[in-house]
Image (cartoon, grey):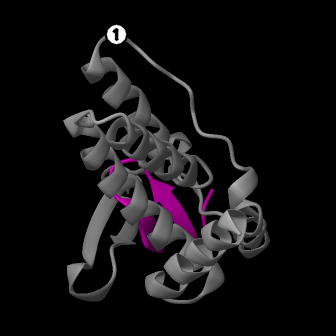
Amino acid sequence: MFSIGEHLIHPGQGVCTVTGFKDTPTPMLILEAGSGHKKTQLMYPVAQSDRLHPAISREAAEELIDHYNDLECDDFTERNANLEETYFKQLIKHGAPDTVRVVKTMRHRIRSAEEHSRKPSSYYARVLKEARRRSLEELACALECTEEHVEELLEAQVAASEN
């Protein structure tokens, strides 16, 4: 079970903080999702808590960022773009490192299509946007810093690999 103050990954919301518990009539976790002016309070059934999992640890986040360039892109393909999009959206629900891998994969696919003078699939941008948001939010939470700082750390890794 989770404890008050613990950060966890909600499949639909991303990073949430456990703020309390409610026992009646059905046991519920009280969660707070989002940051800034977008904070939302959620009630989540304890019976379904197996769908929630702890957010990435500080050590794992540092390791993920330090070895970003070693992270392999996901090579999943399907003839139907909707099935591909569904696959990647499911990965996003797991949190980091899956969200970071999806970001890297979508950026690679967009760049590859453009290099071949093709228009990238429209789902690439949708999936990239959500995976990026969730990645930055979770890594910033783990590292206790801003999302902008996490983005700088990742960009530094990419720049180092290009040199």
Viewer-proximal residue, 110 or 101? Answer: 110
Viewer-proximal residue, 33 or 25? Answer: 33
Q: Describe residue 122's horizontal placement relative to residue 56 as left or right.
A: left
Q: Position of residue 139 (x, y in %)?
A: 57, 72
| Circle 1 residue | 79
For label 1, count other residues whose C-alpha is less than 10 Å away and answer few (under 14), some (14-19) or many (20+): few
**Is 12 rendered above or below residue 29?**
above
Q: Which residue lies furthest to the top in this view?
A: 79
Res. 63 image quadrant: bottom right
Q: What stretch is highlighted in magenta?
A: 1-22
Q: Describe residue 46's horizontal placement relative to residue 32 as left or right.
A: right
Q: Where is residue 34 in the image (x, y as percent from the top left)?
A: 33, 74
Which residue is at 53% across, 53% downward? 95
Q: Describe residue 58's horizontal placement relative to residue 141 as left or right.
A: right
Instruction: Describe the element under mark 1 as helix, strand or loop.
Output: loop
* Amino acid found under the numbered disc labelled 1: Arg
Q: Where is residue 93 in the image (x, y as percent from the top left)?
A: 44, 45
Q: Where is residue 163 in the image (x, y as percent from the top left)?
A: 71, 69
Quadrant the N terminus occupies: bottom right
Numbered-mark total: 1
Which residue is at 30% across, 52% downward? 25
Viewer-proximal residue, 92 or 124? Answer: 124
**Is 37 rendered above or below residue 25?**
below
Residue 157 visible to an observer of this rendering:
yes
Which residue is at 39% across, 68% downward? 31
Is residue 48 magenta-colored? no
**Is 97 rendered above or below residue 4?**
above
Residue 22 visible to an observer of this rendering:
no
Res. 89 image quadrant: top left
